Amino acid sequence: MIEKLTEEWLTLSDVASILGMHPSTVRTWADQGILPVYRTKGGHRRFLKKEIDLWVQTSRQKKEVKPENALRDVLRQIRFKIGKNQLESEKWYQKLDDEARLKYRMSGKNLMQSLASYLGAEGEDAIAESRSLGYEYASRGRRYGLSLIDATCAFLFFRNALLEAMIAIYLDARISDTESWGDMLSRIHAFTDQTMLSLMETYEAFEKNNC
């Protein structure tokens, strides 16, 4: 424990000022082990200045955690989520027979593969990949008698699972670089937004052709 405060030690407020964070964030990060912290006899948090300086230096370097390299872990987390029977609670999933359910359980993997192609492509190729997946979701939904809302909910289930898994991976890696976070989220949203638009446009086209 720390008995007295010297110029080598920082208070929680000192660290918050250095990092440009709210003190509550510093407190949380310290308690989670993200920041190196010590306790006084009175239970107050204290930080060693040289350790905080080193943390700042290393944490603000751009990490080599790229979305395309994390897809295997993302797929593993999505499988775990499905394994916890979260699919069975979805109303759209309850309308499907066994064959259709098997197809939709494969949707997570298809989404990962398409996203991997998107992350490695540019321009029209990337757009074509995302829109092709939207057509696949729409065709499958129509084939199994799902409404547009049901088919959209099915896609959103896997899209949200993807986002949650990717965020969990970045948190586990302690990525604090806002540029890395922003790039990851914007690229996934750009891809999945095009996929959902394609899904809705395809449903609309089916409806018009049946009129």
Image (cartoon, rainbow, N blue to C red):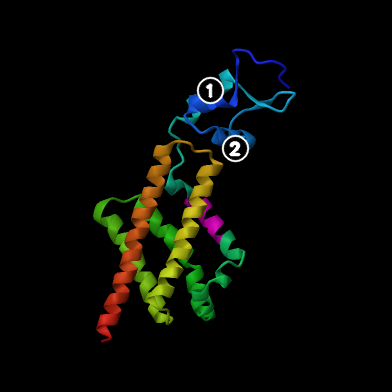
**Amino acid type, residue under disc 2 in the picture:** Thr
Whole-angstrom CA distance, mark 2 to mark 1, is 19 Å
Residue 203 is marked as none
Give the label, 2 or 1, closer to the camera: 2
Q: Residue at x 36, y 49 (%)?
A: 186
**Residue 13: percent from left, percent from top:** 56, 26
Q: Residues within 10 Å of mark 2 (few under 14, many from 20)?
A: few
Residue 73 lies in the magenta stretch: yes
Q: Quadrant of residue 98?
A: bottom right
Foreground residue among 141 and 69: 141
Residue at image position (47%, 63%) is 158
The tag earlier along the polypeptide, 2 or 1, is 2
What is the three-letter code of the residue carrying label 1?
Leu
The picture quadrant where one finds residue 84 is: bottom right
Q: Is residue 9 left or right of residue 188?
A: right
User: Residue 102, relative to residue 34: is it above or below?
Assistant: below
Magenta-drawn segment: 71-79
Q: Which residue is mark 2?
A: 28
Residue drawn where x is 59% and y is 31% of the image: 35
Q: Residue at x 31, y 67 (%)?
A: 198
Tell me: 198 left or right of 18. left
**Neighbour tally class for label 1: few under 14, some 14-19, many 20 plus, Cα within 10 Å:** few
Q: Could you tell me residue 26's position as x and y percent?
A: 56, 33
Would residue 72 appear left or right of 186 to someone viewing this image? Answer: right
Q: Secondary structure at mark 2?
A: helix
Judging by the rendered image, the residue that carries numbered circle 1 is 54
The quadrant of the image that shows the C terminus is: bottom left
- Residue 196 magenta-drawn? no
